[in-house]
């Protein structure tokens, strides 16, 4: 029985070798489909990995606690011209003292302020912060220096790139003085241009870092204060309303990303104990990682479907060729049946031919597919050499990452296509009438 099977396989392979070009073209469709699956998934994995790394850099280990205006107002607050709400400095101390698995906590306070120098003005976001704020937000110093511990309480300021350009369009701002409200501040540094962060879901707000100005948090407390009054009104007179807020945000960096959700729950419980109203929000940017993973899954499904269509087209091509082969070899089939070959022998012979075609195309496609990394790097290097700067930065930083499941899946699908699209031609050949087959010219 086993020897008969090997004879049938040997006969099927020899039949394919008679028409090498046709067999090669049939296998080419499977080759393209298989390699396409691996290449597309590798590219998708590379893009996804790069996106997740960027999200990690943005702070996937961070828990962001923000001040927000409470939804409802009490009767006293409604009658008062000053609203008192938000995070407190005591909240910051409690978080630092009571949560052991955090590496650091960074408080900040921000306000809209008009900065002036001679006849030039800039409507900037004045940020009171500490030394760690630079690293937390991946800011780079263009000239001068960043805030240091010795600057606490001092009237020094670091300008963002656009803010500096508006106040000092043709001069070096370092060492110059500007008006912040009613006081002079000395410019000690300028940050480089930084791409604005986009608002993603409900996790992160959009923010333009290029229109900021940074002063020490202690200086903001001493010189500006927690209470900020604003003039509102119109035709029937002006009124003053105020907001008393100690901190705008506390960014808590957790030591282990696995503890982010638990830490966020502890912070929320801690704040709820000391706040009578919901004047804070706890945001976990790790949601972005989950979103990126879901996007990667959907992207991979889409790519596999596209590549699966390529394999389907290749399978249809193989079926077409095998049907033509059945017609050409009708007399041969009649002779084999007359000499004692059963229908199952004929089915096995034709299935062997289709499986050999698809397996050959699939294996060659896998070998070409796993070479995606070197081939992609070679293409990038060649294009960069011939046309420097023509590749977008995202393409230059992209590195394909082969997913083993895509290799296995593409190979299994290619073999499945061979069996699926070989059954009908094989059955058609097996159920030919032997007498009519022998009469076929």
Image (cartoon, rainbow, N blue to C red):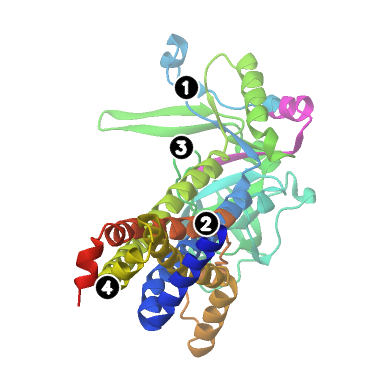
Disc 1: which residue: 70
Q: Secondary structure at mark 1?
A: loop
Identify whether 381 is placed above or below 438.
Answer: below
Disc 2: which residue: 406
Residue at (52% x, 80% y) in the render: 379
Magenta segment includes 106: yes
The mark found on residue 357 in the picture is none
Circle count = 4
Identify whether 41 is placed above or below 168.
Answer: above
Residues at circles 3 and 1 in contact by the CB criterion of under 8 Å:
no
Segment colored magenta: 92-112
Q: Looking at the image, which is closer to me, 119 or 137? A: 137
Identify whether 93 is placed above or below 136.
Answer: above
Q: What is the spatial separation of the Cα atoms under label 3 and label 4, in whole angstroms?
A: 71 Å
Mark sitting earlier along the chain (3/2):
3
Disc 3: which residue: 202
Q: Secondary structure at mark 3?
A: loop
Is residue 117 visible to us here? no
Whole-percent x and y of residue 344? Answer: 39, 55
Tell me the crowding category of disc 2: few under 14, some 14 to 19, or many 20 or more residues within 10 angstroms, Cα based. many
Q: Is residue 42 left or right of residue 24?
A: right
Indicate the quadrant where residue 22 lies. Answer: bottom left
Tell me the crowding category of disc 4: few under 14, some 14 to 19, or many 20 or more residues within 10 angstroms, Cα based. some
Mark sitting earlier along the chain (3/1):
1
Magenta segment includes 238: no
Q: Looking at the image, which is closer to me, 408 or 211? A: 408
Residues at circles 4 and 1 in contact by the CB criterion of under 8 Å:
no
The mark found on residue 331 in the picture is 4
Identify whether 66 is placed above or below 440.
Answer: above
Q: What is the spatial separation of the Cα atoms under label 3 and label 2, in whole angstroms?
A: 33 Å
Q: What is the spatial separation of the Cα atoms under label 2 and label 4, in whole angstroms?
A: 42 Å
Question: Nearer the viewer's eye, disc 3 or disc 1?
Answer: 3
């Amino acid at each position: 029985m086993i020897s008969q099977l090997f004879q049938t396989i040997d006969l099927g392979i020899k039949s394919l070798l008679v028409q090498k070009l046709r067999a090669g073209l049939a296998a080419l469709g499977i080759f393209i489909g298989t390699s396409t699956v691996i290449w597309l998934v590798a590219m998708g994995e590379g893009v996804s990995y790069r996106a997740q790394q960027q999200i990690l850099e943005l702070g996937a280990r961070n828990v962001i606690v923000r001040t927000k205006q409470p939804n409802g107002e009490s009767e006293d607050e409604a009658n008062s011209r000053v609203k008192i709400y938000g995070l407190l400095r005591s909240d910051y101390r409690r978080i630092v003292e009571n949560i052991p698995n955090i590496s650091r906590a960074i408080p900040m306070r921000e306000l809209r302020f008009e900065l002036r120098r001679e006849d030039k003005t800039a409507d900037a976001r004045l940020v009171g912060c500490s030394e760690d704020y630079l690293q937390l937000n991946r800011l780079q110093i263009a000239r001068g220096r960043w805030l240091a511990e010795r600057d606490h309480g001092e009237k020094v300021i670091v300008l963002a790139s656009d803010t500096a350009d508006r106040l000092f369009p043709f001069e070096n701002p370092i060492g110059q003085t500007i008006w912040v409200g009613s006081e002079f501040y000395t410019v000690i540094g300028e940050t480089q241009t930084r791409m604005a962060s986009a608002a993603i879901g409900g996790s992160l707000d959009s923010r333009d870092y290029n229109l900021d100005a940074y002063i020490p948090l202690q200086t903001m407390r001493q010189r500006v204060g927690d209470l900020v009054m604003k003039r509102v009104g119109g035709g029937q007179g002006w009124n003053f309303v105020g907001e008393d807020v100690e901190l705008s945000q506390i960014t808590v960096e957790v030591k282990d990303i696995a503890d982010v959700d638990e830490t966020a729950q502890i912070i929320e419980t801690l704040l709820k104990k000391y706040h009578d109203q919901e004047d804070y929000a706890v945001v976990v940017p790790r949601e972005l990682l989950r979103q990126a993973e879901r996007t990667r899954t959907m992207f991979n499904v889409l790519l596999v479907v596209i590549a699966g269509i390529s394999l389907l087209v290749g399978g249809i091509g193989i079926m077409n060729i095998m049907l033509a082969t059945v017609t050409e070899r009708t007399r041969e089939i009649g002779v084999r049946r007359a000499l004692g070959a059963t229908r199952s022998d004929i089915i096995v012979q034709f299935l062997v031919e289709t499986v050999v075609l698809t397996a050959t195309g699939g294996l060659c496609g896998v070998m070409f597919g796993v070479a995606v990394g070197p081939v992609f790097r070679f293409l990038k290097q060649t294009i960069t050499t011939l046309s420097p700067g023509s590749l977008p930065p995202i393409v230059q930083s992209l590195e394909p990452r082969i997913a083993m499941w895509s290799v296995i899946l593409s190979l299994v699908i290619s073999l499945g296509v061979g069996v699926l699209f070989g059954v009908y031609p094989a059955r058609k050949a097996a159920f030919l009438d032997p007498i009519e087959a022998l009469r076929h010219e």
